[in-house]
Every structure is written in structure tokens, then in C-alpha cells.
Amino acid sequence: MKIPVSWLREWVDFPWDSAELSRRLTASGFEVEGVEPAAPEFSGVVVAEITSIAAHPEADKLRVCQVDTGSGAVQIVCGAANARQGLKAPLAIVGAVLPGGMNIKAAKLRGVESAGMLCSAKELGLAATSTGLMELPADAPVGTALREYLSLDDSILELKVYANRGDAMSVLGVAREVAALTGGRLKPPMLTAVPPVAGDAGPVPIVESGEAAPRLLTRRINGLSNRGTTPLWMQERLRRAGLRSINPVVDVTNYVLLECGQPMHAYDARRVHGPLIVRLARAGEKLTLLDERSIDLAGDEVLITDDNGPIGLAGVMGGQGTSITEEVTDVLLEVAWFAPESIAGRARRHGLQTDASQRFERGVDPQLQAGAMARATSLLVSLCGGVPAAVHEVRNAHALPVRMPVSLRRARLAALTGAYIDDSRVMSSLNGLGMKTTPEWDGWLVTPPSWRFDISIEADLIEEVLRIVGFDLVQEAPTRLPQRFARRSESLVDERSLLDVLIARGYQEAINYAFVDPQLQQQLFAQRSAIRLSNPIAADLSVMRTSLWPGLLKAALENLSRQQDRVRLFERGRVFQLQQGQVDESLRVAGIVAGSRWPEQWGGGREEADYFDLKGDVAAVLALAGPGATFEWRGATLECLYPGRSAAVVRDGVEVGWLGELHPSLRAERGIGATVLMFELDIIRAIAAPLPTLSPVSRFPQVRRDLSITVPVDTPLSAIKSRVSVAAGSLLRDLRVFDIYQGPGIETTRKSIALGLIFQDNNKTLKDDEADALMASIAADLGSQLDAKVRD
């Protein structure tokens, strides 16, 4: 937001130059992103008046002007179409230097002497385009330096106003802050009330959506003229604030917006049929905006309508059908307070960002509307004439925000700041910001002003005191921080260990938004219910993630598209799913692998990473759970993974993770050439370490027996291990797979697996007949449960 320093000085006195003002504002929390001059450097330009004008004897498009400079008359040859007798315009006299280093000299133009140059606004750097000479007011004093007359030796502050300080998006808002910093008083401009005149006031507006628009004022001004030119002083202020002049009526509404922070809109009253109506949109309705774009309405936008349909998107932009042109004679002014939650996100949804929407989203002072209407009426009548009718107001007091008092304790202020701040200093700081302070025995009861939506807790007040007193004035003091140690569960694995494992295996940590592209998430997880954001920052970031994969996949694609041939990323964070109408959050770690297995090297060629590389990485992570944790690898049922090259990680019968190769159809749809591998684990469930238990080491020898069986090809190894553990009981110490075979001698529907079984008894030496009996029991169990056959 741009604020001319000269405009600010009209509202508040301060003793600082632009540099010091910038430093003070930045120190108080308003970041000054830049200070620029109001106009580029030029010299030798004065206010001049054309006293007579004649045709050029040798050129049809040139004219010879006699010009009064205040210190004598000079002859100027000029080609501007708007040059005329009596016009006052800037004159660059001989010796003047214009922006860009252009030196003005006496010259002959087609045989006629010219002692200078009459200037356009563009030639002086005061406009991007111009169609003729810059026209100055009739009362401009001839001979006065233009820089002095227009106060061009001014500075413009560019402020970064954060989302919680919508009240500061105006000259009034910044002036309040400066007044609080100086301890001075505001000097608002004298407001001349314009009483209504009997006439057509139009029908009373109708507010159907009282919660969205608790306050609405309208006023009709009849018989004005919009064909004139906006006064130069107003044009200059608009220009310095970053807005171009359009026509007097529109310029007045923009001026009031910049001055006090209240958005308002003017309608061509002749094109408004019936009363103004504020209501919610109906799904499928269309609206053509001032910029001639047509938008389709979703149904939750607030509209301004008349009897014929929508004429404006409330709090954002007006409609084309009632726009203000030079021909307008009757104007309907609309000033409203719209609830921030009813405006937030609607503009961005339709690709819009306007000065009005920025302010309404942050919150406009709900007591500002009547004053803004009076200010706009006064300016319009003085500039355009016209007869103002009565003001119509529709008000829903119950829906207007009320600032609740907040307690500020002296002890809490001292504890958080580490400093003693005198009571009088605290009260003067808060009072200077427009707050009402009532002393109490332990501090103050503070009521924020109507324009401060960001003050709701004690810490907010402490911040305000420090902003005004000055953070640099708080003396450094040693702080006592008592340590409280929380009890930590032994089963939780330190997250640093998790990060170390992945980093050691070549992964880099990525950090993504918790909200993702709904289309990508739907492609990956069609069956999962995503939580939709009511106010997304962008259309492709409009749902909460149900997995870490969408963000990682997007990051991997960004890297692959920038010629990175080896991508290994991981992320830890929370995912959000709807479970029986409730939001379920879980902490996950996920990774993505694409491209080469190893970094480029001289010792071997390039090989793409595959499923088994990924499985090794996941196994290394799961090893953090300790030797007592057992996992099964089962076929994954996720549609986004390639069947046969994917798995679900199962612990205690519950799926705690997934890994595998991205399905080829998704790769093709996304235009991905490389193989993409992904994993995701529930950190709490997958990596929780079972508490170790003490057991004595047996002094009796172990016994090994080997068992070779055939089973159906689709029998998972985990099922075999499970049945062996059940049949062998507590005597089984270890199970080792030392051979898997399919081929000649084995039925095509079966596979051969050789197991090494280690038995041990803690109380005695196992005899051969006991070990043989165990083997027979195991073989029988496998045969009955898994159709296993013992090989000879």
C-alpha cells in the first residue's frame, strides 16, 4: 500500500523526515518496503498561461503560442491538440532539465523560434500516458515552480500491511499509528455535512442476508455532471497512491477508500431497477463485472442485485450494467459493512483481487459507514454539483461486531517483556491507539476500538504496548526459565533417529503445504474423503491432504522437469481424514524415489531404482522399532500403486504403511517418464518400539531342523511363519528361509520353500525324538492350514 507523506502530514503532525518515519513505522510493526519520490527529478518547469495562439505558417499540426511565464512573455511552438488561449500548463523554460536528462534549449521549429516547451504529464514523469498538455487549474499562480505548486518534493511510503491489520489500509489508519508514536492528535479534514434536499431518494434497500451485510447505507445524488475533470490535487493524490484517475464520481469513491479505508460503490441510478437487494447468489447465476469478465456464481457469494438480477459482487467489484460513465447524471452511492467471513476467498475463487476485497476480508470499521457517506457526498457535490437525497440505512445491530474488554495484568506485562513499564506509559500507549483503559487493582481493563479486529487476548495488548513504547527501549535482563521435564514413553522412537536414517540413505527433507490439489489427490485416493477448505489460498490448494504423497509427487515432478536425474525426497507431517464425520489426524513419514539408483559414478552405468531398493529403505526405517517388532509384507490394495510391485506393511494385524511403484496409468496421465516409487508409514504405529523384557539366556544347546515344503504360489511367507510359530510354541527361537525355488520338478501352481528352524528349551536339553515330534506337528499344521506338502 502506498501512502504519500504529504497526505499523511495533513492528518497528523510529526517531526520526522521520510527516512526517520520509515524507521519508526518499521520498528512498530509496519514494514516499510520502500520510499520513492513523488515525481522524477526535473528543474526549470513553471506554471505558464497561453495568452494567444496562432497557426504555424509552415506546418498544419503546429501552432505558435504566446505564453506568460510570470516574468515575461515567450513564444512557444506546440503541437498539442488541447493547446488553447487561457490554458494554464507546465512550461519548461530554456535551461530546464526534464526527466531522463533532456535539456531544453531555444530552437527553431520549421522556421519559427521557440523558447522552451509546453509539457504533458508523461514528459514530466507524472503519468504513464497522455494525450496532450497537462492542464493546470485556472487559479494556478503563473510563474510558480511546478514542483512547488504540486508539492512534488514529496515522498511515497510503500507499506506492507499484514492480514490482521486491515484498519491500517488507509491514510487514517496510518495516521492513527503515527499519532500514537508521537503522542499527538489526529487532524481529520473538516467535514461539511450536506443535508438532504427533498427529491427522489429511491426505494429503501432490502437486505436478505443480514448476517453477511449487517449495515447498508444508500444515497441518491440527482442532477450532477460527470463530464468535468477531476481536480488536479485529487488526481495527484490518487496517482501517488497507485491509482489512475477515471472520472470525478469514480475518483471520489476511490479517494474516500484511500483516505478512511471504507470501500464504497457508485451505481448509475437510471440503470438500477427497483431497490438495491443484498442476498446470496444462486448456483449457476452469472454476473458481468466492470472489467467485462463474466463469472459463474457458486451460490455462497454475496450479491448486490436489483429487480432484474445481479449488478455487483458485494465487497469485490461492481457490475458492468450499472457502471459510471461520463453521461451519468444520477448516482446511487452504496456504503456497507460486510462480514469478513462472507467476503473472504470469494474474490480469489474468481481470479479477482481488488482494493475493496482486500479491506473487507481483513475487516472494516463497522462505525465508519456514515462518515464515509458524508465525506463522499460532500466531495461529489463540490466537484460535480447535484442534489443529494436522504440517506437510507438498513442495520442489523445483533450481527455487527462488538469489541469485548480484555484484562491486562501488570504482572503478566512484566513477565512477558522482562521490563518495568510505568503505568502512565502503558495507559498513554493504549489510549493513543484509540483504546479505552480502566484501571484495576492488578492492571487495566482495556476495550479495543471498533476498528481493531486483532485485539482479543492479553498478549495482544502487551504487543501493542511494546510497539508504541519501542522494543529497543526494553532493557535486557536475565530471564529465569524453570525447567519442567515431561515423562517420555519408552516406546516412542526419537524423530531425529528417523531423520538420520533417511538422510543417511540419500533422502532430502521436503516441506509442503498441508493443503493440496484436489484433482491430484482424487487421482491417488479416489475412496478417501478429503476436507475442503472454505477459504483456500488457491484453487489447486483447496483440500487438506489425506496423504503426504500428493505434495511429494508434485515436488518430485518439479525436480524431474528441471533435469534432476535422481530424486529422493522425504517428508514428515500430519494427514487429515474424515472418519465417521470426525477429523482424524495422524503423524506420517513418507518418501518418494525417482530416477537413478546411485549418483552418477565412474564405476558403473546408470540403473533405475526399483521396488526392492525402496523396500530396503523402508526396512531400515522399520528397524528403529527394535528386534522385538515384527512386520508382515502383504499385497497392497491401493489403486494408485502397481499391483505386484507394491506392498502393505502390517503390524499386529493392522496396516501401518504402504510402499510401491506408482501405477503406470497415473504416470501416463501425469506425463511422467521415470519410474516413481513411494512409501508412507504411520510413525506412531509403525515405529513404536515394544518395551524390552528381561529373559535369561538358556544354558542348554540349540537344535536345528530343516524343513522343505511346497505351497501354492500365492501363499505369503508371513503366513508360513505365523503357522510355524503357532505349532512350535515357545520352543521356537528362530526361523530362517534359505531357499525358494520354482521350476522343473515342482508343479507350476506351487513353489518350494526351505526353512531352517532353531529350537531351544530353557529348562533342559531337547532330545532328538522331541525335536522330531515338533517337526511332525509343524508339518501337519502347515498341511492342514496352508496346503503345504513336505518334500522328500
Image (cartoon, grey):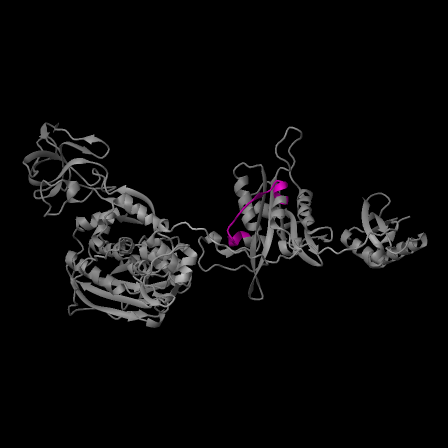
30 is within the stretch colored magenta: no
Q: Is residue 220 in view from this perspective?
A: yes
**x, y (%) of residue 649?**
68, 53
In the image, farthest residue toward the right: 769
Q: In this image, 651 relative to 368: left or right? A: right
- Residue 764 sits in which quadrant? bottom right
Q: In this image, 122 relative to 345: left or right? A: left
**x, y (%) of residue 466?**
36, 54
- Residue 431 sits in which quadrant? bottom left
In this orientation, which residue lies closer to the viewer: 11 or 537?
Answer: 11
Residue depicted at 18% across the width and 51% down the height: 230
Q: Is residue 83 above or below residue 470?
A: above
In this orientation, which residue lies closer to the viewer: 376 or 651?
Answer: 651
Q: Is residue 573 above or below residue 374?
A: above
The total of numbered circles placed on residues is 0
**x, y (%) of residue 143?**
9, 40
**x, y (%) of residue 562?**
52, 38
Residue depicted at 59% across the width and 48% down the height: 666
Q: Is residue 716 in view from this perspective?
A: no
Q: In this image, 524 relative to 768: left or right? A: left
Q: The magenta stretch spans which residues?
A: 501-520
518 is within the stretch colored magenta: yes
- Residue 432 sits in which quadrant? bottom left
Residue depicted at 50% across the width and 56% down the height: 543
Q: In this image, 705 relative to 287: left or right? A: right
In this orientation, which residue lies closer to the viewer: 361 or 594?
Answer: 361
